[in-house]
Image (tube, helix red, strand yellow):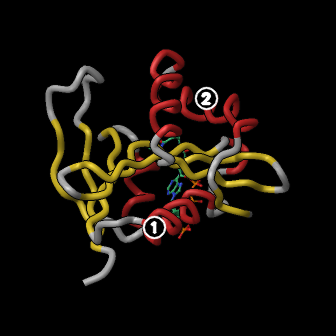
Amino acid sequence: MEIRAPHVTDLDTLMTLAAAVIGPERAGPFIRSHLDRHHLLVADTEGEVVGVLAYRTDWFQCTLVSLVSVREDHRKRGVARALYHEVEGISPSPRLYSSTEETNSAAIQMHTALGFHPSGYIDNLPQGYRELLFYKRLHP
Ligand SMILES: CC(C)(COP(=O)(O)OP(=O)(O)OC[C@H]1O[C@@H](n2cnc3c(N)ncnc32)[C@H](O)[C@@H]1OP(=O)(O)O)[C@@H](O)C(=O)NCCC(=O)NCCS
């Protein structure tokens, strides 16, 4: 598996992966804005994009992972772990944040397995559930 920057030809797959998490309406503008800022990483297995991680670096002067999505038939094989490992290496800040809805037990367990610690939550969002924040200190 290779973690790399997206190619133009990956766009449709990225839209599909993002739409699975945030819905088709939000996926287009979300992927395009992260593409413009070069804040997307993809996991490529034998020429196929099987996962995407989007991040931003302007969040309270910290790095925030804004979306992770792995193709269903490639889950539990270390794809998300590899994507997080890459963003940890390129983060300009030693403070890495990530989040998920309080109902997403797989993502909550993933954050714990990847060494994140709970760091509060956001209430009153339109999604109807709390968004749990996770934090990882990358280096002293
Ligand atoms: C959550 C998600 C990104 C995990 O991706 P993945 O590639 O399957 O995760 P990995 O294989 O890299 O697993 C990393 C760790 O997370 C944990 N984990 C992953 N999926 C899990 C699950 N379904 N249940 C429990 N733990 C899980 C494992 O403990 C694993 O640690 P290990 O390697 O020591 O076993 C994937 O299930 C997904 O795309 N879900 C839909 C979108 C989503 O919920 N995104 C996150 C919120 S934005």
Residue lying at 47% horizontally and 62% vertically, measured from the top left: 87
Residue 127: image location, x then y, percent: 30, 23
27 or 99, which lies in front?
27
Q: Are marks 2 and 1 in contact (CB under 8 Å)?
A: no
How far is mark 2 from mark 1, CA to CA? 23 Å
- Going by the picture, which residue comes out furthest to the top? 25
The quadrant in which the C terminus is found is bottom left
136 or 95, which lies in front?
95
Crowdedness near tag 2: few (<14), some (14–19) or many (≥20) residues, C-alpha within 10 Å: many
Residue 77: image location, x then y, percent: 67, 61
User: Horizontal placement of 63 versus 105: left or right?
Assistant: left
Question: Measured along the vertical axis of the image, is residue 130 above or below residue 140?
Answer: above
User: Horizontal placement of 60 versus 137: left or right?
Assistant: left
Question: Measured along the vertical axis of the image, is residue 16 above or below residue 75?
Answer: above
Residue 18: image location, x then y, percent: 54, 33
Residue 106: image location, x then y, percent: 46, 49
Q: How many numbered marks, from 0 up?
A: 2
Residue 15 tag number? 2
Hey, which quadrant is residue 126 in on the image?
Answer: top left
Residue lying at 66% horizontally and 42% vertically, measured from the top left: 71
- Residue type at the position of mark 2: Met
User: Horizontal placement of 10 versus 38: left or right?
Assistant: right
Residue lying at 29% horizontally and 71% vertically, measured from the top left: 94
Q: Give the labeled residue for mark 1.
A: 90
- Residue type at the position of mark 1: Ile
- Going by the picture, which residue comes out furthest to the right? 46
Cβ of mark 1 under 8 A from ligand 1: no
Circle 2 SS class: helix
The quadrant in which the N terminus is found is bottom right
Residue lying at 18% horizontally and 45% vertically, measured from the top left: 121
